[in-house]
Image: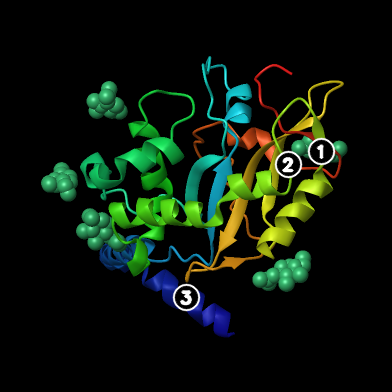
Amino acid sequence: MLLRKYLVKNLKMKPVIPYYLIFGCFWLGIFFESAKHILVHSDAYPHKWEKLYLVHHWPVTVCKMSKNDCKDPEMYWTIHGLWPDKTEDCNKTWHFNISELQDIMGDMKQFWPDVLHPNHTSFWKHEWDKHGTCAATLETLNSQKKYFSKALEFYKKINLNSYLLKVGIKPGSTYYELAAIRDALTSVYSVEPKIQCLSPEEGQLQTIGQIKFCLTKEFTLRNCTESTSISSSYHEHFFKEEELSICNDTLTYYPSHLHT
Ligand SMILES: *[C@@H]1O[C@H](CO)[C@@H](O)[C@H](O)[C@H]1NC(C)=O
Ligand SMILES: *[C@@H]1O[C@H](CO)[C@@H](O)[C@H](O)[C@H]1NC(C)=O
Ligand SMILES: *[C@@H]1O[C@H](CO)[C@@H](O)[C@H](O)[C@H]1NC(C)=O
Ligand SMILES: *[C@@H]1O[C@H](CO)[C@@H](O)[C@H](O)[C@H]1NC(C)=O
Ligand SMILES: *[C@@H]1O[C@H](CO)[C@@H](O)[C@H](O)[C@H]1NC(C)=O
């Protein structure tokens, strides 16, 4: 009965509907316009992250992964980046400005080189755009100089190169059980870093490529929990690092030359 009454009423009102429609659309339009504004606006802030990765890479392996003809890859672990988890590209209007790195240029070139190209600028710009703009929500990292300096400071503090040598793990034509590398690192740092490898070519062994240390927002080392690594396969990578994956528990090359 009720339904019928409703239908009748509506039928009777039919000629009026276009006005409702036009009027309704108008308000609906206003509503979505402001909703869109709110969404876009809030989109500038939800870049929440929990920990930082200080990523080291092994230049010989980076060169192996590239078609680029590296002449003399560094024979020490260099910085790939300082990456907040869970977020990327947080502020597209905050442009990279190389002048801000003037005071730390010596260290930047030595410890944070673009392994593949003589001009490091576009690598550093990439790191700033993709990761630095997100890290900058911390006051301790809220300028380009602070961000790059802090990464350098931590790289030196972690001192991966000398600790590896100290425990007798050296690059060369020999290979290691992954567990030996992992246990050595864990005993030195009391945390377990993530170790990434290049998958083996046929009949070969995996090759160590990257070591990621996890840091709290207060810059203390912490264990990396497995779960929350950002899935960034759809993002642009600088060094084809999508070819790296968590190393398997097998024999592992730590090469000193491009061709082993
Ligand atoms: C993005 O960067 C610009 C330029 O540095 C700055 O003015 C703005 O506040 C930043 N926005 C956010 C959400 O941090
Ligand atoms: C880049 O940084 C330098 C040094 O801090 C500053 O003088 C200059 O104005 C900046 N340039 C731009 C385009 O922001
Ligand atoms: C390096 O590349 C940047 C742009 O990517 C350019 O502005 C700069 O002049 C280059 N530096 C040298 C020394 O070639
Ligand atoms: C990290 O995990 C290891 C066990 O894998 C544990 O022994 C160590 O205490 C942990 N370190 C921190 C700082 O939580
Ligand atoms: C580890 O083993 C899995 C399964 O065999 C394989 O898919 C993956 O590519 C291997 N990873 C590396 C770094 O070799």
Callout 3 crowding tier (Cα within 10 Å): few <14, some 14–19, many ≥20: few
Labels 1 and 2: the sequence-earlier one: 2
Label 1 – label 3 distance at C-alpha: 83 Å
Determine which of the numbered discs, if any, sits on residue 8 in the image.
3
Q: Amino acid at mark 2?
A: Ile
Q: What secondary structure is marked by label 1? A: strand
Q: Which residue is painted at 64% across and 50% down in the image?
A: 163
State if disc 2 and disc 1 touch (CB < 8 Å). yes
Q: Amino acid at mark 3?
A: Val
State if disc 3 and disc 1 touch (CB < 8 Å). no
In percent of width and height, residue 215 lies at 55, 63
In percent of width and height, residue 119 lies at 35, 26
Can you tell me whether the CB of the residue at mark 1 lies under 8 Å from the nearest atom of ligand 5? Answer: no
Viewer-nearest residue: 202 or 212:
212
Report the mark closest to the observer, 1 or 2: 2
Labels 3 and 2: the sequence-earlier one: 3
Q: Which residue is painted at 59% across and 85% down in the image?
A: 1
Report the mark closest to the observer, 1 or 3: 1
Report the mark closest to the observer, 3 or 2: 2
In percent of width and height, residue 58 lies at 60, 35
